[in-house]
Amino acid sequence: MRKAAYDSVLNIEACRFQGILQPFPPHFHEYYVIGLMEEGERRLICGNMETVTRQGDILVFYPGDTHSCVQAGAEPMDYRALHIPAAEIERLAEERHISVLPAFSQTVVSDRELADCFRHIHQSIMDGRGAENRGKLLRFLSALWVKYGGQSAAPVQEYREVVEKVCAFLETHFAEHITLEGLCCYAGLSKSTLLRAFTKNKGITPYRYLETLRIGEAKKLLEQGVPPVDAALRTGFSDQSHFSRYFHLLIGLSPGAYRDIFTGNNTEEKE
């Protein structure tokens, strides 16, 4: 069972995946993701850290955090998550008089009290009552920041400036036909050097980074009601089947079902 909803007042997406065995390959999001493992175990890799998530664990991902997960036990995953745009996080932090957003040294947090609070907030959004619990959402985020936030400097990686230059190029030209040879020429690096440097800095290959960018842009189009076939063509996918397959692989929903969240407020898929 895959369910999703969108709260237009909070500008937050909520999703719930129950009975899921699907692996999720390395990818990232443009928004914050806060999730809760209700059941099942998953082997999670985020950056250079690997851990096994278990029942009751809270997951926190920053925009741009590359992560992946696979099944770690026999019990299927039951997972709920909120997708919060960075602008909303900054606005909520300002309301709580938090001038600098903290960094989290750990992606996985075990805290029963916060998990119970998050579950209530998430369910209210799924039920169309998210705006009623905005205050509770603010208190939850504040508690999460105060208890588990810190300040950590990002490590300096080899060829970091070149990799950022390549990322900026991909973000601008994602809808075009892009080859590894062309990226190497643009970066002034050999294939092996670019692949090694890019993966070391971003935790993901240039091709996977490009595809993830395309999915992120396609989501924006689907949110505006653009048909999936048009969203695929406008974001550089060669055909709709490739687009649909990759969209489901990363987002957990079909493009049509995701579009329905914004045309009908919620959606549900059964397998």
Image (cartoon, rainbow, N blue to C red):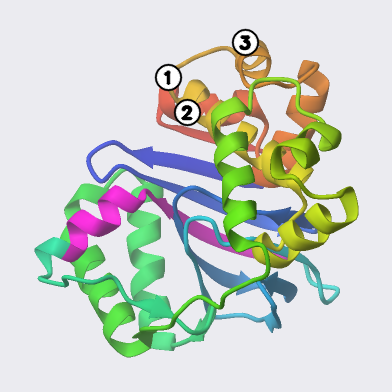
Side (left or right) of 187 relative to 262? right
Label drawn at residue 230: 3
Asked if residue 12 lies in the magenta stretch, the reply is no
The percent coordinates of residue 69 (x first, y second) are: 74, 65
Residue 67: give x, y in percent of width and height: 66, 63
Callout 2 amino acid: Lys
Tell me if label 2 and label 1 are in contact, CB under 8 Å: yes
Amino acid type shown at disc 1:
Gln
Q: Earlier in the sequence, mark 3 or mark 1?
A: 1
- Vertical placement of 80 versus 37: above or below? above
Residue at image position (53%, 60%) is 80
Q: Identify the residue position indicated by label 1 in the image.
A: 224
Q: State the residue at coordinates (76%, 27%).
A: 178
Task: Identify the magenta region.
Answer: 77-93
Q: Is residue 86 magenta?
A: yes
| Residue picked out by circle 2 | 220
Precedes in sequence: disc 2 or disc 3: 2
Residue 52 in the image: state x and y as whole percent. 71, 82
Q: Residues within 10 Å of mark 2 (few under 14, many from 20)?
A: few
SS label for mark 3: helix
